[in-house]
Image (cartoon, rainbow, N blue to C red):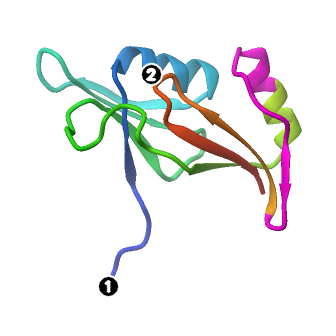
């Protein structure tokens, strides 16, 4: 089967503009697309700099209420530096955790979707 990567992950949010502000201004994601779909919804697609997988900020899946996604992993080459930058932007982060597989911190977006920031 020629499937070779995950392309887009839908992140359920309650307010697309508020979520876009968080992902771009706090996490530093880049806007790939921000197009109207209808009067109330937009196709907002974002990616981390140099990322291969993108996210869309969705409000239209009844079975995916805002905040229901958990455990998505973001990678960084310098966890301390990334945490310092995120804290300067107002993100509250716990202490860095150590595990047999690496170091990480967890946080949530403005809707409660849970992320893991992990060092390469």
Q: Locate residue 24: give its quadrant.
A: top right
In this image, 22 relative to 105: left or right? left
* Residue at 40% in and 40% down: 68
Q: Which residues are magenta?
A: 85-101
Marks 2 and 1, how far apart in space? 34 Å
- The mark total stands at 2
Q: Secondary structure at mark 2?
A: helix
Can you give x and y, in whole percent of width and height, for residue 66 in the image?
36, 31
61 falls in the magenta region:
no
Q: Which mark is residue 94?
A: none
The residue labelled by disc 2 is: 20
Crowding at mark 2 (Cα within 10 Å: few <14, some 14-19, many 20+): many
The residue labelled by disc 1 is: 1
Q: Secondary structure at mark 1?
A: loop
In this image, 79 relative to 49: left or right? right
* Residue at 85% in and 36% down: 95
């Amino acid at each position: 089967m020629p499937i070779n990567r995950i392309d887009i992950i839908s992140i359920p949010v309650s307010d697309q503009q508020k979520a876009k502000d968080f992902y771009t201004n706090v996490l530093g994601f880049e806007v790939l697309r921000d197009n109207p779909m209808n009067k109330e919804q937009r196709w907002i697609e974002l990616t981390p700099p140099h990322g291969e997988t993108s996210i869309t900020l969705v409000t239209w899946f009844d079975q995916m209420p805002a905040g229901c996604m958990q455990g998505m992993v973001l990678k960084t080459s310098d966890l301390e530096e990334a945490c310092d930058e995120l804290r300067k932007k107002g993100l509250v982060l716990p202490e860095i955790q150590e595990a047999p597989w690496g170091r990480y911190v967890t946080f949530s977006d403005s809707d409660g979707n849970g992320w893991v920031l992990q060092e390469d």
